[in-house]
Image (spheres, helix red, strand yellow):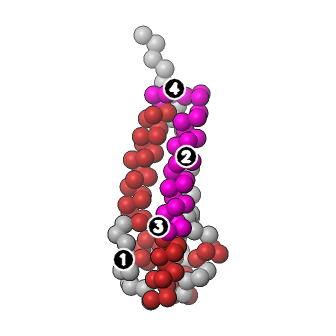
Amino acid sequence: MSIIESDWKKFKELHKLALDRFCQGVLADAKTIAQHDALSAHARYGMIYRLMRDRDKDIVQTFDPYSRSSAPIALRWMVKHDLLTDAELSVLSEAMLEEVADVVRQPYKLEWVEEIVRED
């Protein structure tokens, strides 16, 4: 499904907002992990590595490719990852809102590792 011109113009602005919010979230999560002194530096490094690997897949899936034909599915991913509010989405046409109405929001949550300490 392609989108109408007015939705495409609004989508481009929402895309910028969601991308910035996504990146800010990743950076905030990386900072939270890095500052979690209860874990060793190695455990924190591993968590940040996994965070970046997993979120890299999501950024590609959500924000690439950037085209009118991919906009509806990209918008669904943005809603799923809770990157846009209902108020922000309300600028879109009724048809576009119906396209994302069934999407369940699943905000990102950090999954902390339990560190295994080896005793040699």
Mark 3, mark 1: which one is toward the viewer?
1
First-in-chain label (2 vs 3): 2
- Can residue 81 be seen by looking at this rendering? no
Q: Residues within 10 Å of mark 1 (few under 14, many from 20)?
A: some
Cα separation between marks 2 and 1 = 29 Å
Cα separation between marks 4 and 1 = 43 Å
Name the residue type under label 3.
Answer: Trp
Q: Which mark is residue 67?
A: 1
Cα separation between marks 3 and 4 = 34 Å
Q: Which mark is residue 77?
A: 3
Residue 101: quarter of image: bottom right
Q: Residues within 10 Å of mark 2 (few under 14, many from 20)?
A: some
Give the extent of the magenta segment: 16-43
Numbered disc total: 4
Name the residue type under label 4.
Answer: Ser
Q: Residues within 10 Å of mark 3 (few under 14, many from 20)?
A: many
Q: Which mark is residue 29?
A: 2
In the rendered view of the protein, which quadrant contains the C terminus? Answer: top left
Task: Tell me the SS state at disc 1.
Answer: loop
